[in-house]
Image: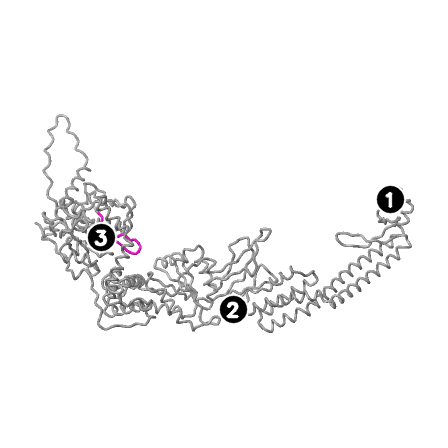
Amino acid sequence: MSLPEPTGLPVAQLRWRCQLPASAVDVASDELDRLGQRRALDALRLGLEIDAPGYHVFVSGLPGTGRVQAVRRLLAGLADRCAVVADKAFVHDFADPARPRLIELPSGRMRPFAQRMAELATDLVAKLDALAEDEAHLRRRRRLEQALAEASSRQLAELAAAAQPAGLSLYEVKEHGFTRPALGVADGDEIFPIEALRMLAQQGRIAASRVDAIEEAARPVQAQLERTVIELRRAARARARELSAFDRDQARAVVHPELDEVAREFPFEPVEQLLANAEQWILERMARPQGERFARALRRRLAVNVVLDHASRESTPVVVVNHPTMANLFGSIDVRTGRSGALFADHRSIRAGALVEADGGYLVLKAGDVLAEEGVWSTLRRALKQEQVEIASREPALSLKPQPVPIKVKVVLIGESEHEEFLEEHDPEFRAIFKVRAEFDDQIERTDENVARYAALLRRLAADERLLPLADDAAEALLEEAARRAGRGGVLTTRLSPLADLSREANLFAQRDAARAIGGGHVRLALAAAREREDLNERRFHEQVRAGTLLFSTSGEKVGQVNALTVVTTGVFDFGRPARLTATVAAGDSGVLNIEREVQLSGEIHDKGVFILSALLRDRFAQNHPLALAASLCFEQSYGPIDGDSAAAAEWFALLSALAGVPIRQGFAVTGSLNQKGEIQPVGSVNQKIEGFFDVCAQEGLDGQQGVILPRRNVKDLMLAERVVAAVAAGRFKICAIDSVDEGIELLTGMPAGTIGADGRYPRDSINGRCADHLWFLSEAVRDAKAPPEPPPAHGDAAAPAAPAAPAPPPAETP
């Protein structure tokens, strides 16, 4: 018994036609990012306005849904909430130069202070140089030096007078860079140390008795000499202290007024402490020779490195970082190499990052960029928890370690669902820091009100970008594209970016036509041009089909072979790619073999679809006996990964065809998922899949016997290309919808699927009946193959019994 030819869906169900309402709707430009995003915007506003630890915001959603624009607009609206934040700078730590000190001054005061300190260094160098050359100062210093020297000379004169009666002379000896008095014996123009007299006696240059007399007379003088040397050294130290005190007093008279003037201009505790330490350092070095080296050292130590300045700030800082490296986000230390090759850096080398720049405001980051940079996420998490930034050098040999910079920043992290899932899985502290989640939806309901608002938004976008105005048919064409991009019936995509790009490209075609407005034809031209730019892989596929390299059948009938539908993603556009799917069956107990899985080309979801198919097979045909089957399924000429379960229905039909021995119409292609009860479930990218098979059929020649079978639950999702709609309207192509696998096999074979009768059997002239019969005989064949052989009869026994009768008909089957 054959069934009538399948009838397809009416043309009206193949594509939604947009008709704008008669009354226009106007929207403000600041509503461009609010289309269907009320919940997300409310959550975002909550996170931005609440002031409590951990209330940073993770903004989730697909690109193009207005996430970034919404964040920018909301932050701009919070500009008047400018928090009072101190200016920050690094200065030299006179006690520990390797740990630069962070100082804070009221907003707007740090930059003037830095300039004033630079002026102070210049003034001090000039005045200290002038002091060193001042005649009055030099005269006072010389008088002090002379007085101290005269006291030493008097002591030496007294010692020389005591030595003369003993025939001794006083002379100076240099040791280790110092000069000290010593006793000796004059011999002509030479003076010999007393210690050398014994050696002279041995040489005959002096009598031994005289040596004894000299040594005896020298003992009291030597003792006096030693006391004098001690007193002279003590006097030298005292003289140095007096001179140093004199120099400090003279320098203090110059330095202190200058420092005191700065302290009065900037009456803040960090400034007072810095100036006190600077004064002490300067005065300690006044006894040393001054010069350019001292001037450079003074300027370096008095320099103020401003890392955060609010002098010109009129609103809350909003910092957007597009390249969040460690240096850009947390700061860095510039390292210089000295002449010896050693690394050098000081407080002037410190550079602040975006976290410090955003202090008192907001920092906007993209999660994908943050996770792509090694170490950035963990460092960011630590900085937000501790509310401070540690600026470090990437050079491990550098010992410079600045004090941490305290911050008060609200971070907005923009990402997609996979970024959020990754952070939740790998960082248990993620939610404790980012407590607010603002999820932007990528779809809105396709109501009349939303259609009108959407059209108004598109027109506002064109006006804001100074494009030609959108005619009604252009707005309708853009809205139909929004419906198609949503991929689901009754909704529109909220990803405005692609539609904005399409408007700009349509505007170019309108300008070329010298049109006064963008029309629907211009939008369709822009769509065709965009698709042509992206369809290289699709064209290559069709070239292979025309050349016969890829084997397809769009006419005739084949057993165990069906046209399945797949989709290929290529950036901007997806395209449907039909695939020949074949099935083979034989006796065995291995079940259904997924060849793609065996060669590790099958994804997890595709594997699940094959397992469901096997379960449905057992449910229908293996209730009263084991399923004795060795079947295989294969996507022919497929050499890449395959995933998804949208081919499960096609795999079922190919398997039933192979079991029943009934051919399948090759003019049809199938898409659809299935469950264990044989119900057909909806799939994604249904429009692209249908168009992909249609284009292959059109290339081979449409004959009215070709079409696509899809889940009935996908009918509402149809937004087919005009070329497909026109072919269906002309009766040259069919779109058929089904709810169950039985409906599908009947369409493909023209033979009833068959239902269980009152006797528990499928009809013999049905697909299911033939499959049940075939599976019964396969199970008998497997059982016979596994049975042990009969032993041969013993010699003289009776002849072997006759062969058994043919097996009984298969037992009743229950689903």
The segment highlighted magenta reads 565-579
The first of marks 3 and 2 along the sequence is 2
> In what element is the residue under mark 3?
helix
Viewer-nearest residue: 321 or 422 = 321
In the rendered structure, does residue 219 fall within the stretch colored magenta? no
Viewer-nearest residue: 777 or 253 = 253
Count of marks placed on residues: 3
Whole-Å distance between the Cαs marked 1 and 3?
Answer: 122 Å
Q: Residue furthest left?
A: 1
Residue 692 image label: 3
Whole-Å distance between the Cαs marked 3 and 2?
Answer: 63 Å
> Residue beneath label 2, please?
87
Looking at the rendered structure, the kind of residue marked 3 is: Gly
In the rendered structure, does residue 568 fall within the stretch colored magenta? yes
Magenta region's main secondary structure?
strand
The first of marks 2 and 1 along the sequence is 2
| Mark in the foreground, 2 or 1 | 2
Horizontal and vertical percent for residue 493?
28, 63
Rate crowding at label 1 as few (under 14), some (14 to 19) or many (20 or more) other CA atoms within 10 Å. Answer: some
- The image quarter containing residue 660 is top left
> Residue beneath label 1, please?
200
